[in-house]
Amino acid sequence: MPLFPAAEEPDPASGFSVRQSSRARRLSIKVYPRGRVEVVVPKRTRARDVEAFVEENRSWIAKTLEAFAEKHPPEPFRLPARIRLRAIDREYGVLYQPAEGDGKVRYRVNGDIVTLSGRTDDDAACVDALRRFLSATAKAHFAPRLKTLSLETGNAYQRMQVRGQKTCWGSHSSTGTISINYCLLFLDPALVRYLMIHELCHARHMNHSRRFWALVHRFEPRYRRLDSRLSDAWKEIPTWVGLH
């Protein structure tokens, strides 16, 4: 039984989240510029070992967060009036229509307008509705792209699902399910293509070995530059999405 459940939100007591990875060979810490701290650990890592590792690196974590805060001051939260999705070359206006007696917020799309109706005075409910819009949009546009790339590369998969992962842009499970982060909608199409190729290549190599990267290179020779850009692409995700 895992010692740590999959955690996407930092634990209130510790201030960091823990993610188990079957590919991890050692403990590592990721500090994100918007203040999130994640500890990546191999499976079957003991809780006390994680706590000791974090304690040893407290000073580095604090200095890194301080440096990020100076370079990238916190952005104020505000609901969007427009949403630009670079990956599919679309831009939507967002309208908010309050409705009394409705405890939920629903969305509907008409052309290039997304309308939210219901408790639009509830920011969290509005964000949840917009995330559902992003998820549906990503599924509609990314599914055919992934299928085409699968045929082009000869790397098969069983199914695609869209999620809002805080820890990664995509993943490929041992059962053949490729998970795509809907936040990719905000990025350059070249980064989306690279991410899909990356995950498809895991169909043959469920690791990041030399053979894996050689296979990625076969289909995307610019993978090093694109991988570096993708690692830093958090800053292109609007603050209101609340994931990166």
Image (tube, rainbow, N blue to C red):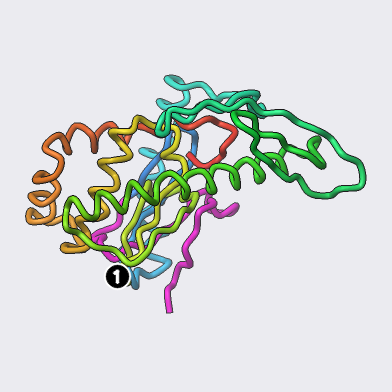
- Residue farthest toward the bottom in the current orientation of the protein: 1
- Residue 13 magenta: yes
Examine the image and state in which quarter residue 44 appears.
Answer: bottom left
On screen, 57 above or below 177?
above
Q: Where's residue 139, x and y in %? A: 47, 50
State the residue in front, 114 or 132.
Answer: 114
Q: Is residue 211 left or right of residue 196?
A: left
User: Main SS of the magenta segment?
Assistant: loop
Asked whether residue 157 is in view, the answer is yes
- Residue 239 magenta: no
Say what amino acid the circle numbered 1 marks.
Ser
Q: Residues within 10 Å of mark 1 (few under 14, many from 20)?
A: few
Q: Is residue 99 left or right of residue 65?
A: right
Which residue, given by chain and number where applicable, does mark 1 sit on? Answer: 174
On screen, 240 above or below 20?
above
On screen, 67 above or below 167?
above
Q: Residue at x 73, y 45 (%)?
A: 106
**Magenta span covers which residues?**
1-28
Mark 1 secondary-structure assignment: loop
Q: Where's residue 152, x and y in %? A: 18, 50
Q: Residue at x 73, y 37 (%)?
A: 116
Q: Where's residue 202, x and y in %? A: 22, 59
Q: Residue at x 47, y 39 (%)?
A: 244
On screen, 105 above or below 62?
below
Q: Is residue 178 left or right of residue 129?
A: left
State the residue in front, 140 or 53.
Answer: 140
